[in-house]
Image (tube, rainbow, N blue to C red):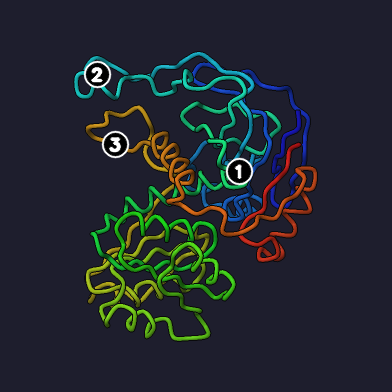
């Protein structure tokens, strides 16, 4: 089978490997389409990924790495169920409904179309907890966004919004657009989209942004104050990871508001401490797709397996819009060209690029 790997900075290639077997708690998925995360994958490609120093997520601790985590395909093999290593009767007694199975492969059958956190490979072996079935009404392109929809679902829960809040989102890429939609679903009465690019703001309107602000063409602070009756945003989601946006987020946040760091930041972020201090504000971070599955629901209701399935349901029901743009489509054999194009000009591929494996 063919697999894409990054051997080092600016060194990506396609290699031949044996097709793996599905182990306990795993399914084997034959790829049809995989989405490129221009944020994470570019950090890996350029050698600027923070994880190389933080030593989180074992699969990306050192080169070579297998990039990708938005894979759509068909199940071709199903492994046996797996039980959690630390399961015990005490956990069962706390929450019987949670059980001890954390990788229930029983819901999958050969031929099922799924979205999973598989890498860019023709055949990807993934835990069943990292996969969800795709209804016929959802296209492959739409389904690739379910993973980022899970990430932004978790980030919205981290905000702990109050019903009627105003939420501002800085950076209207795919993540920003999904975060804005989740804020609406989570009780926000007003949403404000901020970006440098007018075209991206037009897309934000398509997914329900109440107000849009083109940073650089108008004063974002004055605009936010105008839209919030001079209160400021209750919560500001920084989804771009760009320099200077943390300070902007603090300036448009209301007194005792919250700024959430959703976008990856590879450089040290600076801000004026007084803006945080005198507003008694709060800065929080959000990481990936949420807590591990298999924990007692009494304590952790939304593990990432439950959230991924909910994200697919929300796309199916139209509560999350995923067809507001057309992704750029490439053959997986063009990965070198695609990575180079994104590195030189990320706007050239639109909001997302996808790889065709057929």
Circle 2: element type: helix
From the top left corner, tell me how far across and down residue 83 is, in percent. 40, 17
The image quadrant that residue 259 belongs to is bottom left
**In which quadrant of the rendered image does the C terminus lie?**
top right
Q: Nearer the viewer, residue 171 or 227?
A: 227
Residue sitting at x 37%, y 68%: 191
Q: Which residue is mark 3?
A: 301
36 in relation to 212, above or below: above
Disc 1 + disc 2, Cβ < 8 Å: no
Q: Nearer the viewer, residue 160 or 73?
A: 73
355 in relation to 261, above or below: above
Q: Nearer the viewer, residue 10 or 84?
A: 84
| Mark 2: few/some/many CA within 10 Å (<14, 14-19, 20+) | some
Q: Which residue is mark 1?
A: 139
- Mark sitting on residue 92: 2
Residue sitting at x 40%, y 49%: 153
First in residue order: circle 1 vs circle 3: 1
The nearer-to-camera label among 1 and 3 is 1
Circle 3: element type: loop
| Mark 3: few/some/many CA within 10 Å (<14, 14-19, 20+) | some
């Amino acid at each position: 089978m063919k697999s894409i790997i990054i051997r080092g900075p600016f060194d990506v290639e396609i290699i031949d490997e044996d097709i793996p077997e599905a182990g306990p708690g795993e399914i084997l998925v034959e790829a049809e389409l995989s989405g490129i995360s221009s944020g994470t994958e570019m950090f890996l490609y350029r050698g600027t990924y923070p994880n190389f120093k933080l030593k989180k997520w074992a699969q990306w601790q050192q080169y070579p790495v297998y990039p990708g985590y938005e894979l759509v395909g068909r199940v071709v093999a199903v492994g046996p169920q797996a039980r959690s290593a630390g399961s015990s009767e005490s956990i069962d007694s706390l929450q019987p409904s949670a059980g001890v199975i954390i990788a229930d492969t029983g819901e999958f059958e050969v031929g099922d179309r799924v979205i999973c956190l598989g890498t860019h490979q023709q055949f990807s072996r993934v835990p069943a907890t990292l996969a969800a079935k795709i209804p016929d009404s959802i296209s492959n392109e739409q389904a690739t966004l379910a993973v980022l929809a899970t990430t932004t679902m978790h980030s919205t829960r981290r905000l702990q919004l109050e019903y009627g809040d105003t939420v501002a989102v800085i950076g209207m890429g795919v993540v920003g657009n999904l975060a804005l939609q989740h804020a609406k679903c989570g009780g926000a009465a007003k949403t404000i989209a901020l970006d440098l690019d007018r075209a991206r703001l037009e897309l934000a309107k398509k997914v329900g942004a109440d107000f849009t602000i083109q940073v650089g063409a108008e004063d974002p602070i004055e605009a936010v104050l105008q839209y919030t009756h001079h209160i400021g945003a209750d919560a500001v989601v920084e989804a771009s990871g760009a320099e200077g946006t943390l300070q902007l987020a603090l300036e448009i946040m209301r007194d005792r508001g919250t700024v959430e760091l959703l976008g990856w930041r590879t450089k040290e972020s600076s801000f004026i401490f007084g803006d945080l201090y005198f507003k008694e504000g709060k800065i929080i971070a959000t990481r990936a797709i949420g807590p591990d599955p298999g924990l007692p629901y009494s304590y952790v209701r939304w593990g990432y397996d439950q959230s991924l399935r909910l994200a697919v349901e929300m796309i199916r029901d139209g509560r999350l819009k995923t067809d507001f743009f057309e992704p750029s489509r490439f053959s997986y054999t063009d990965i070198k060209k695609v990575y180079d194009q994104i590195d030189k000009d990320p706007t050239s591929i639109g909001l997302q690029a996808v790889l065709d494996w057929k």
